[in-house]
Image (cartoon, helix red, strand yellow):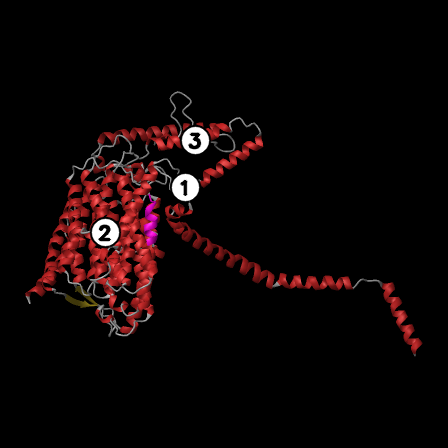
């Protein structure tokens, strides 16, 4: 009895604590917010959110609260209903932990910014929107959070407004997210019209759910989570400062799409076509992103593509009808991806703004903490046994191998796993080992606690999180226990293959072979030509068609050719032929006239 | 870096073999072939320094560069925080107003009839004159503000 009260109170208290730095300066008279203040707030909120999580782990308690309905139509209820189930209660501490580390890091990274408090407030507003999305029970509140994270992502990516490419990237993010929003609004409309509710509980139908709302949801997830067709915004979003990339585009915003699919999973599980679509889309985006990541030269872009690839993997898990496993992957991925971004931020700042790995090397001696955490993060990403990635990634691949689905998706995902190993190893090797290639006099140190503490905390999280989460949460579907040895070790084999590939390539690079420019390398480096193709082709087509319709069709055809000029042309032809007929030889006519009259007279 | 030297020497040797070709047609053909080879062998992601156009930090601080006429809009209490600067600023502004006519006259005389050839501004020619449009140059914001 009391535990329910404690649960609800602590969750709402967490949300209120987060809202405080935004609301207090408006209500009181002294706007005295500082980065340290905000970091402390998030830390407090994290500690508060541990309470419901432990309650859940201990007793499996879930709750749903419904307050204050928005009464605008008689029989359609939109309450503010908060669902504190396994997913939201696990997500809150993880998101708050990651955000706390990122805010602490950002107080060092953005120390030279004049508007640093505004930056922190933007990050906090983003966090609020994300938590609203997570805790929402009905699609309306989820949509509020959805739009909120989209807007904050725009503001944060374009933080340095003077930079033209940052503005383009922010616009790209918003537009691609908008296309995804069409999907979610479509499914909300269908739900409202056919089931008269937007609550997630009531979306379960025992018969097969029709395709339309599911298509909408998959479109929404593809837009928000950068699946294959709507992916260019994610690498472009690296124009924002590194804390932004770490928070938004590694752990929280990009999982919003997957989270939507997890929440509406009962609807999805009936329709096998939709699940297969998720599967194929996910495997395609995994492979594509991994292929692009192999030949990138900017650290942040490599990590962005790796995020994209892991998102494809999460989509594959949803396609396998395993939402809990997808959520597990979200949680573990948040830890090591945020850590990778923070490590890369530390490296970038220490190298005075240098982001290209071709200009780094030999950092192991100079930044030991950062590089060891980078290695841990990369190992976790690759799915090394018993680090965090293993628990989720290996399980996904095992389940894929033992379930009844199409081989193509399986092949793509396995290939992508080996590519993951390749590019992470490439990044690690080029960044850390060998002789250094940077400018010779760069002062660098890691003495600041604001750097080392967050990174080591997240490293600890990456190592422990997988173990902790799987030990305490009982899975709803029994994972496959028995399978032939080959399938069990499939993931590790692919990873080792990838490592061997990377080592081979680096050996080749050390001997004096000139790199060939084959089509494959071009494809991979230029992101598969997708960006220029899509952006330029659609706009040129649109403009060309517009010009054709406006000038050629209307002006030229209808007004000229069909109307006066066309008729005039026809007439011209007829008159020309008839004038040649009419040749005007009078004598011949008169003589033929006379001849014919004579003949008639003679006959008669 | 040593690999680069190796390939550069190879390329240099190829150039030197064809150095003495006097026939103009053949020389242009060789040049065209060389340029095509360059285009085909270009790096797909050439390395760009962070601060150069196209780099990651280019124009990053553009939004913090405020023009200098904003200083005129400061409240007197704020201006009182930097009294010596603002005193000198009045003198500089008077100087600018005096020399403006002379700068314009110099620019008008020195540009050729159909418009200026380059973007470079001429230096001051006479004693006691200031170079034309010096105010824009002197009051430009810092490269990395703050």
Q: CA distance from mark 3 to mark 2?
A: 44 Å
What residue occupies the far bottom of the structure in this picture?
A604
Camera-side residue of A476 and A335: A476
- Image location of residue A508, percent across then percent down: 34, 39
Q: Which mark is residue A383?
A: 2
Discs 2, 1: same chain: yes
Query: Residues at marks 3 and 2, common chain?
Result: no
Magenta stretch in the rendered image: A287-296
Residue A516 image label: 1
Say which residue label 3 marks: B10
What secondary structure do most residues of the magenta stretch adopt? Answer: helix
Question: Considering the numbered disc 1 on the image, is that residue within a helix, a strand or a loop?
Answer: loop
Mark 3: secondary structure: helix
- The correct choice, above or below, for A324 with respect to A338 in the image is below
Taking the magenta stretch, the answer to whether it contains residue A11 is no
How crowded pointer 1 is (Cα within 10 Å; few <14, some 14-19, many 20+) is rated as few
Q: Secondary structure at mark 2?
A: loop
Residue lying at 49% horizontally and 57% vertically, measured from the top left: A545
Read off the chain for label 3: B
Q: Position of residue A172 (x, y in %)?
A: 34, 52
Of all residues, the one furthest to the front in this rendering is A485
In the picture, measured across the screen, residue A105 lies left or right of residue B40, that is left
Tell me which numbered mark, 2 or 1, is placed earlier along the sequence.
Answer: 2
């Amino acid at each position: 009895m009391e535990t329910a009260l404690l649960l609800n109170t602590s969750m709402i208290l967490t949300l209120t604590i987060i809202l405080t730095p935004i609301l207090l300066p408006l209500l009181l008279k002294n706007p005295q917010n500082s980065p340290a203040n905000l970091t402390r707030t998030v830390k407090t909120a994290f500690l508060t959110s541990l309470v419901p999580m432990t309650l859940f782990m201990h007793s499996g308690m879930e709750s749903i609260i419904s307050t204050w309905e928005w009464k605008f139509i008689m029989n359609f209820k939109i309450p503010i209903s908060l669902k504190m189930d396994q997913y939201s209660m696990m997500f809150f501490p993880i998101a708050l932990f990651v955000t706390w580390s990122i805010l602490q890091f950002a107080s060092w990274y953005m120390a030279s910014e004049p508007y640093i408090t505004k930056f922190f407030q933007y990050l906090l507003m983003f966090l609020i929107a994300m938590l609203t999305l997570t805790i929402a029970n009905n699609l309306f509140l989820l949509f509020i959070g959805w739009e909120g994270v989209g807007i904050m992502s725009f503001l944060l990516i374009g933080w340095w407004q003077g930079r033209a490419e940052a503005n383009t990237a922010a616009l790209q993010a918003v537009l691609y997210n908008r296309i995804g929003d069409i999907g979610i609004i479509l499914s909300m409309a269908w739900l409202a019209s056919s089931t008269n509710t937007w609550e997630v509980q009531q979306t379960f139908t025992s018969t097969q759910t029709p395709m339309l709302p599911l298509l909408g949801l998959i479109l929404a997830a593809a837009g928000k989570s950068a699946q294959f067709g709507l992916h260019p915004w994610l690498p472009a979003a690296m124009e924002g400062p590194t804390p932004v990339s770490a928070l938004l585009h590694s752990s929280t915003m990009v999982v919003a799409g997957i989270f939507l699919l997890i929440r509406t999973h009962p609807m999805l599980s009936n329709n096998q076509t939709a699940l297969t679509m998720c599967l194929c889309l996910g495997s395609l985006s995994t492979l594509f992103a991994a292929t692009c990541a192999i030949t990138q030269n900017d650290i942040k872009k490599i990590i962005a593509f790796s995020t994209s690839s892991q998102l494809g993997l999460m989509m594959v898990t949803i396609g396998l009808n395993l939402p809990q496993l997808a959520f597990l992957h979200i949680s573990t991925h948040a830890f090591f991806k945020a850590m990778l971004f923070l490590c890369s931020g530390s490296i970038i700042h220490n190298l005075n703004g240098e982001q290209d790995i071709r200009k780094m090397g030999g950092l192991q001696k100079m930044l030991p903490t950062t590089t060891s955490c980078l290695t841990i993060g990369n190992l976790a990403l690759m799915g090394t046994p018993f680090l965090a990635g293993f628990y989720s990634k290996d399980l996904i691949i095992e389940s894929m191998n033992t379930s009844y689905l199409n081989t193509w998706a399986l092949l793509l995902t396995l290939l992508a796993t080996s590519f993951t190993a390749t590019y992470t190893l490439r990044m690690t090797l080029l960044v850390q080992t060998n002789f250094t290639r940077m400018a010779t006099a760069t002062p660098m140190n890691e003495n600041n606690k604001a750097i080392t503490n967050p990174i080591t905390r997240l490293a600890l999280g990456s190592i422990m999180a997988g173990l902790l989460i799987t030990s305490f949460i009982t899975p709803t579907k029994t994972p496959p226990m028995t399978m032939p040895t080959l399938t069990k070790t499939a993931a590790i084999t692919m990873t080792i293959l990838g490592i061997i590939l990377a080592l081979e390539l680096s050996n080749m690079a050390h001997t004096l072979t000139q790199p060939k420019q084959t089509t494959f390398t071009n494809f991979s480096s230029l992101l598969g030509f997708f960006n220029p193709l899509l952006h330029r082709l659609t706009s040129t087509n649109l403009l060309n068609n517009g010009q054709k319709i406006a000038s050629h069709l209307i002006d030229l055809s209808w007004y000229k050719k069909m109307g006066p000029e066309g008729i005039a042309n026809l007439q011209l032809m007829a008159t020309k032929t008839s004038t040649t007929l009419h040749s005007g030889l009078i004598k011949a006519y008169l003589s033929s006239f006379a001849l014919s009259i004579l003949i008639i007279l003679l006959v008669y | 870096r040593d690999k680069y030297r190796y390939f550069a020497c190879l390329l240099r040797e190829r150039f030197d073999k064809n150095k003495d070709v006097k026939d103009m047609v053949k020389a242009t053909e060789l040049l065209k072939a060389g340029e095509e080879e360059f285009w085909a062998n270009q790096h797909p992601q050439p390395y760009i320094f962070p601060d150069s156009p196209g780099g990651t930090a280019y124009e990053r601080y553009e939004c913090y560069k405020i023009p200098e006429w904003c200083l005129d809009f400061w409240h007197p209490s704020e201006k009182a925080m930097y009294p010596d600067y603002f005193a000198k600023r009045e003198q500089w502004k008077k100087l600018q107003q005096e020399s403006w006519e002379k700068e314009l006259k110099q620019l008008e005389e020195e540009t050729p009839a159909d418009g200026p050839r380059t973007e470079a501004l001429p230096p001051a020619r006479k004693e006691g004159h200031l170079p034309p449009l010096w105010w824009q140059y002197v009051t430009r914001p810092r490269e990395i503000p703050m």
